[in-house]
Amino acid sequence: MARFLVTRTLLLLVGLAAAAALIFFTLRVLPGDVAGTIAGTQATPAQLAHIRQTLGLDRPLGAQFASWVGGLLRGDLGVSLTTGTPVAANLGRALSVTLPLAGLSLVFGLLIGIPLGVWSAIRHRELRGFLVSAVALVIASIPVVVIGLLLSAWIGGELRWLPAQGWPPHGWQGDPGRAFVSLILPALSIALVEGAVLLRFTRSAALDALGQDFVRTAAAKGMTRTGALITHGLPNVLLSVVSVLGIQLAALLVGAVIVELIFQLPGIGLSLVDDVQQRDLTQVQGELLVLTALILVVGFIVDVVHRLLDPRERTAGGAE
């Protein structure tokens, strides 16, 4: 296990380093000029040159990259080129919206996917079990942006049960109850799609478990099929769910970024779009690096949890 943790940690660090380099140099080849954005269309060449010199944009790319990485190692993500505020503080405010949204979406997705997946597997020979699986297949094929627009227009606009858009002026500090309610529809938009995908995987794993000898033996001894599956087959089902959860969590974070645009939530997705339009390179590269780091760390945690839960992998790791 120790060898596995060291190897995965090294891979995580290599992945972060490669992502940092890719993000930095990719942003530098995109068209546009941040000095021109700051100075406006009437700026003279001398004014543009002065802004570039002040911001350090006239230095060689290698020197700029080394300066940025040095700041990262000290925990300093730099300063926004357009507002002059620390990137880390701006990211903190954005993540206070994005991370709760992703967490709430995960909870809703698990509550939808696992119970309905197990239920539809137990009733896979019945029409209602087939219908649940078919509906999940349809929902899983619909983009999150479409689900979000439909829920915003129907539940938020037509029925007015929940806020269709917006965020409290002072966020969690001003009105935490209203802030939480503002996240429900966006989270449900993501959870319906992610939950449908989880339902399909859970159903498949549960059907496989129902065919295993230990479940059939438990049923032969008098247990119901539902009881035998939950008592003896659920650990195997959850192991399969954990495997796919790593991929789904990355998709969930991306979905959160998209949904923020629909529901006008001041998270990292809305901030990223604004910063790209303003060519705020320091802010954009900080946001992309944090998003990439979150996805890589989630993958690392899922790998470790899967290793701990699966006795076959622990045995294989010990034999190596």
Image (cartoon, grey):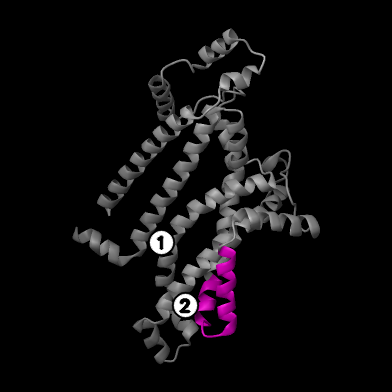
Task: Decide which of tag 2 and tag 1 comes sooner along the chain.
Answer: 2
Residue positioned 47% across, 27% down in the render: 28
Most distant residue in the top direction: 46
Q: Observer-nearest residue: 101 or 121?
A: 121
Q: Observer-nearest residue: 98 or 235?
A: 98
Judge from the rendering whether residue 15 lies leftward or rightward of residue 249; answer left or right.
left
**What is the chief secondary structure element of the magenta stretch?**
helix
Q: CA distance from mark 2 to mark 1?
A: 19 Å
Q: Is residue 205 above or below residue 308?
A: below
Question: Disc 2 marks which residue?
Answer: 230
Decide if residue 279 is in sight here.
yes
Q: Amino acid at mark 1?
A: Ser
Residue 208 location in percent, x, y? 40, 77
Residue 154 falls in which quadrant of the image?
bottom right
Residue 56 location in percent, x, y? 49, 16
Q: Is residue 7 above or below residue 242?
A: above
Residue positioned 25% across, 64% down in the render: 315
Q: Nearer the viewer, mark 2 or mark 1?
A: 1
Quadrant for the C terminus in the image: bottom left
Residue 68 falls in which quadrant of the image?
top left
Question: Disc 1 marks which residue?
Answer: 243
Q: Where does the magenta region start and end?
A: 115-140
Residue positioned 50% across, 81% down in the render: 122
Residue 13 location in percent, x, y? 35, 40
